Amino acid sequence: MGSGTSLYSTEEFKLDTKWLINPRYLFVGPKIGEGAHAKVYEGKYRNQIVAVKIVNRGETSEEVSKRETRFDREVAMLSKVQHKNLVKFIGACKEPFMVIVTELLLGGTLRKYLFSLRPRCLDIHKAIGFALDIARAMECLHSHGIIHRDLKPENLILTEDHRTLKLADLGLAREESVTEMMTAETGTYRWMAPELYSTVTLRRGDKKHYNHKVDAYSFAIVLWELIHNKLPFEGMSNLQAAYAAAFKNFRPSAEELPEDLSLIVTSCWAEDPNARPNFSEIIQMLLHYLSTLTSLELMIPPQIVFSELPPASPGTSALMSVRHRTGEATDVENKNRGFLFCFNHCY
């Protein structure tokens, strides 16, 4: 980074000292993910294996200002909410880089997990279990007045045993306000609510009125995907999917779903945001469906239940990404030592 004056003073970064990490104890290893404005690495903070998100400051003064604001907002919200279905926040710092440190989940993203199962679908109990994990995380965010705005399989991470989902990445989340207009810098088009578009192409940064019900719509698309293990709006580009949803009220087909499950999905992606349930209601609907499902199965003779079970999924070890722990891991670490040295040197 050089020895010039920093663009930011530490006084500008307001964070409770209990969340402020000391970069001297942070070590960064191999890259495990990358987004438009940040990269995520496997790392170690003190004695804990962690995920290290390093935000790119940008090139222009406008980019720098916008990314700093987004970073500050994400850190503030991460430190504000804690839930078993939200990736655990460990801490952050702003110098020498804008860094967010969270727990490291080894199960990979929901997107990768679903892809590894295709063409098979998830067992329906597991699909609904995952849906409940998501709904509970969203209920927690909404109870704190936070809209996620980027709910999609890439932002849902599995625990190592592939039994639990946790919601990650509050980079696009916003605190909800009755009066404030919010920008349209939202998540991936395929999962976005129709009200985030206007009758003309919505420019990035334009202001629109919307509320927390945008997350209910995204949840419906994710739930449909959990059940079918197919890409929603298959055959369409992201923009085509967004246009069809917003201006033609087009949705993936829910005709083959059981009635109770179809009601959950279709009510969540209703065109009118006011007609969509909140996440407390969604949780109750999912629990009711799960109990109904269990009751129906108890009425079926055991031999029929066993014959209709889907094929056993591969073992956890077969689905997990390979983590190198031999000489190969040493090679990865060696490749990253230059970055490690830079990080400590800059500090």
Image (tube, helix red, strand yellow):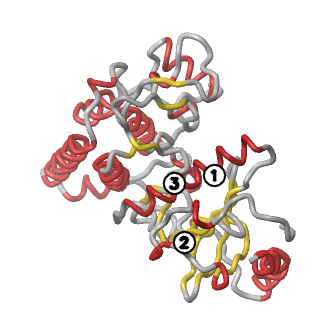
Quadrant, the C terminus: bottom right
* Along the viewing direction, whichever of 60 and 305 lies nearer the viewer: 60
Residue 248 x, y percent position in the rendering: 48, 12
Whole-angstrom CA distance, mark 2 to mark 1, is 24 Å
List the residue tagged with mark 3: 74
* Left or right relative to 305: residue 160: right
List the residue tagged with mark 1: 68
Q: Mark 3 touching mark 1, by CB under 8 A?
A: no
* Left or right relative to 156: residue 24: right
Q: Is residue 114 visible?
A: no
Q: Specify the label residue 87 is tagged with.
A: none
* Along the viewing direction, whichever of 107 and 118 lies nearer the viewer: 107
Q: Specify the label residue 104 is tagged with.
A: 2
* Left or right relative to 182: residue 61: right
Mark 2 residue type: Leu
Mark 1 residue type: Glu
Whole-angstrom CA distance, mark 3 to mark 1, is 10 Å
Residue at horizontal 54 percent and vertical 28 percent from the top: 233
